[in-house]
Amino acid sequence: MERQKSMEKGLLRKSLSIRERKFPNEDAFLEAGLSRKSPREVKKPQNDDDECRVTASVFLSTFVAVSGSFCTGCGVGFSSGAQAGITKDLSLSVAEYSMFGSILTLGGLIGAIFSGKVADVLGRKRTMLFCEFFCITGWLCVALAQNAMWLDCGRLLLGIGVGIFSYVIPVYIAEIAPKHVRGSFVFANQLMQNCGISLFFIIGNFIPWRLLTVVGLVPCVFHVFCLFFIPESPRWLAKLGRDKECRSSLQRLRGSDVDISREANTIRDTIDMTENGGESKMSELFQRRYAYPLIIGVGLMFLQQLCGSSGVTYYASSLFNKGGFPSAIGTSVIATIMVPKAMLATILVDKMGRRTLLMASCSAMGFSALLLSVSYGFQSFGILPELTPIFTCIGVLGHIVSFAMGMGGLPWIIMAEIFPMNVKVSAGTLVTVTNWLFGWIITYTFNFMLEWNASGMFLIFSMVSASSIVFIYFLVPETKGRSLEEIQALLNNSVQ
C-alpha cells in the first residue's frame, strides 16, 4: 500500500514538473480549479474521492460498450444450439460443420489483425459501429443461407466484427473507468458475453435455427442506436492532441461539478512521456522495455485458448451427446449457472484481485478437464458406464463456468491495462491475433480430436491449465487499484 501511494505521488510530481516547464504560470489556475479560458468558473478541486467517483455517464458508457460483447456471446452460442438443425436441413458433414463452427474464430483472427489500427484511426466509438456493420451483414447471410458456402461467408463476417470487438471494448472501458472499479467494469465484457451465450443455449433448444439468427440481429441494431449517446475515450483524444475534446469527454465522465485538471494533465503528460519517439511500429515492439508486458499479454491469450475453452463452449452439445447426457438439459443448466457465476466474478475481480481469480479459474478448469478425460476414458473401456453421463455433465459444466469466472475475461482486462499508449495498437493487435489464431486451431480440430481420442484431448487440456497456474504465479503482476499510469510505472520499474 505504501509503495502504491509513493508511486502515485511520484507520477503526479513528474506530471506537474512537465506541466510547469510547458506552462510556468499555470500553477495558480490548477490549484484553484480554474481554466485560462473561463477564470470566473470555480469548480470543486479534484481529490482522490473524485477520481474514484462512478457517475451515471460511466455506467451508461460501459453498458453500451458491453452490449457489443452480448452480440459476441450470441455468435459464440449459436453454433451449439443450431448444430442439429443446420446439419439436418442443409445435410452438412462433420467436416463442413466444423468449418462453419470454427470459421467464426478465423474471422476473428482477420479482424484482430486490423483491430488495433482501426481503433486508433477511427476512435473507440466509431470502431464499434464499424464492427456492427460486419455483424449485421453476417447474421443476414446465415439467416438466408441455402448451402454451406453462404453459411461460412456469414459466419466469417460475423467473426471479423467479433474479432475487432474483442480488442476495442475492453480498451475503451479501461480508458474511461475509475481505477478502483476498472477491473469489474472491464469484466462486464465477459459477463455480457456469457449472457449472450446463455440466451442462445436456452432458446436454441426450442426455436428453429433461422429464427435464432433473427434473435442475433436484434442486439446488434440496439447497440448501433445506443453508441450515439456515449462519449469518446478521453485518452484516445489526448493521444491525437485534441485536448479540448479530451477534457470535455473527461468532464462528462467524471461529473460537471468536478475539476478534472489534475487527471487530464496526468493523462496528457503520460502520453507525452511514452510518445517521445512517435508511434511505434510492430518491429519496434520487440524491445527489452516492452518484453515483460508482451510476455504477459501473449502468454495469457495463448494459455487461454490451449486449455480448450473455445472448443468446449462451441460444441457443448456434442460433448453431452458423446457422454450420454441429454444435450438440451445440459446446455440449459450451463445457461442458468453461467451468468450468476460471471456476475460474482465481476464483483470479486476488484476485491480479490486478478491473480487470485486467474489461478482459481485455471485450477477449476484443470480439474474439470481431468474429470472429462476420466469420463471418456471409462466410456472407451466400458468401465462404470452409469458414471459417464454424470462425470460428463459435471466436467462440461465446471469447465465452462470456471472459464467464465476468470480465464475468460481477465486476460482481456490485463491486456487493456499493461501496454502504454504508444504501443497499444501494435501490442494489442499481436495479443488479439494470438488469441484468435489459437482459438481457430482449437475450434477447427476439436470435433476431429473428439472422435479420435476424447480422453487424451482433455488430459492435454488439463495439463495446460496446470501450466497456466505456474505462469500466472511467477509472471503476472497484480494490477487492481492502480491507474493505467501507475501500472506503466510499475512495469517500467520491473524491467529496469
Image (tube, rainbow, N blue to C red):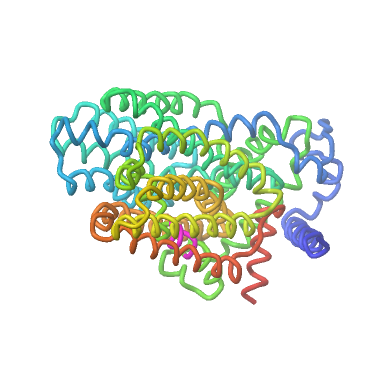
Return the x and y of residue 365 as percentages of the image width and height.
49, 55
Measured along the vertical axis of the image, is residue 291 above or below residue 383?
below
Return the x and y of residue 441 as percentages of the image width and height.
30, 57
Per the picture, the main secondary structure of the magenta-coloured stretch is helix
Return the x and y of residue 27 as percentages of the image width and height.
83, 50
Relative depth, front residue between 473 and 366: 366
Whether residue 306 can be seen here: yes
Q: Is residue 363 left or right of residue 180?
A: left
Judge whether residue 492 is colored magenta.
Answer: no
Relative depth, front residue between 39 and 296: 296
Whether residue 434 can be seen here: no
Relative depth, front residue between 379 and 246: 379
- Give the image quarter of residue 433: bottom left
Q: What range of the chain is rendered magenta?
A: 299-304
Measured along the vertical axis of the image, is residue 266 above or below residue 202?
below
- Give the image quarter of residue 380: bottom left
